[in-house]
Image (spheres, rainbow, N blue to C red):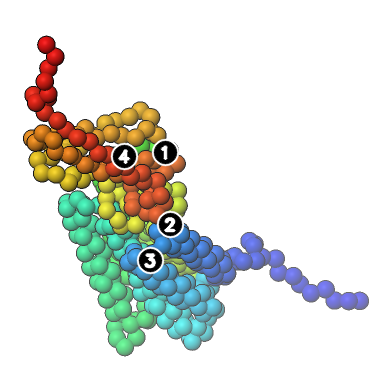
Amino acid sequence: MSSISNLTVTNGPLWNQPENHGPVVSVMTWLLIVTTFLAVVARILTRLVVVHTIRSDDIAILLALLFAIGQSIATSLQVVAGLGQPIDNLSASQVTRFQKNAYAADILFVGALALTKASVILYLQSLTPVREQRAANFVLGGLVGLWAFSSVFVFAFRCGLPDAWDFIDGKCIDLIGFWTFFDIVNILTDLALVVIPFWILSSLQMRRRRKTIVLVCFSCRLFTVAATAVQIYFTQHELTDSDDLTFDLWQVVLWTEVVQCVSLISACVPYLKPFLEALETGMIRADGGKTTRKGLDISGSSGSNGYQKHSMRKKSRDPESVQHDSIAMGNFHPGDKQTQTATISARGRGAESDGDSQSSQSKIIKKQIDWTLTDESSVPHAV
């Protein structure tokens, strides 16, 4: 007779066993970082296609991506070392590697978030010439920098030297309390990064539909706020009075990856091509060019003294109609020949950008108008 071996039936899927939650953390970590990578690449390619240049905010998001990739690698190494498993099932060397990788992941996480916020702040700074708005943006940047540097310092020296990474057996600060403080500041700065764009856009003359699209794009950072709130919940619920950190920490680590991913992706959403097109039709230029108000301009120059030109905009119900200038002339001498060169920029519904781009230059019509002015008093009247 053949012997039948006893089979052990486990609950749950193979990638998330009750005694080992590490695989689900590993799978989600790489799924999220690949999604983040694609979002950043799409942002950079969109910028290159639309405005043909890379700016400081793009460099910041690329650096944030590098930090995020490093953080994801450190998280995966935590899983290899025993994250999601009971500490009693791990060797001393595994516990040590787990803590060292967690130490590196926390510092890289701070860097990724800070650089992501810096990217958004730099972008907003290029959108507005208003002094008060730029000052508020500058203050927010200073607060983010202070928050980031202080957090890196605290995480780097959170436990007694020389084993600053040993948060299980070492003498450490109140890590749960500091993580909660860190996350609250993260939420507040993200809310500020939503409020400031609303403030900037409130002063712009844009169609309601386009303004709504722009505001929705910037409001995507609210998803980061929601993910951070969930991270706070698991930090408080799972880690308070925990005596098995390698096992209980897996949900906190998982939501840390979610926060990092959503933060970077939300910073890339405003760079989508439809958003840039909507932005270009407003008062502001996404490529950092000179800002102008929405509408069609006629600019002129006079080659004679005593000629004064006053420009007056006229609203038109037809978006394809060309707006005209009202020109008033002051003193002139009889017989003087006045020459006016007018540059008329005509745009249709499909091309409303005010920028001096190559496409807009191709739609400029230049016309030189010559006329002679005479004094009616010098002309004899019929009797």
From this view, report whether residue 164 is shown above or below residue 250. Answer: below
Query: Three-letter amino acid code at disc 4?
Result: Gly
Read off the residue under disc 1: 348
Read off the residue under disc 2: 50
From this view, report whether residue 354 is shown above or below residue 18. Answer: above
Is there a contact, CB below 8 Å, between mark 1 and mark 3? no
Residue 15 showing in the rendered view? yes
Q: Counting residues from the N terminus, which is met first, the one under dot 3 or under dot 4? A: 3
Q: Counting residues from the N terminus, which is met first, the one under dot 1 or under dot 2? A: 2
Left or right relative to 31: residue 270: left
Read off the residue under disc 4: 295
Query: Three-letter amino acid code at disc 3?
Result: Ile
Q: Secondary structure at mark 1?
A: loop
Cα gap from disc 1 to disc 2, whole angstroms: 20 Å
Q: Secondary structure at mark 3?
A: loop
Q: Nearer the viewer, residue 350 or 242?
A: 350
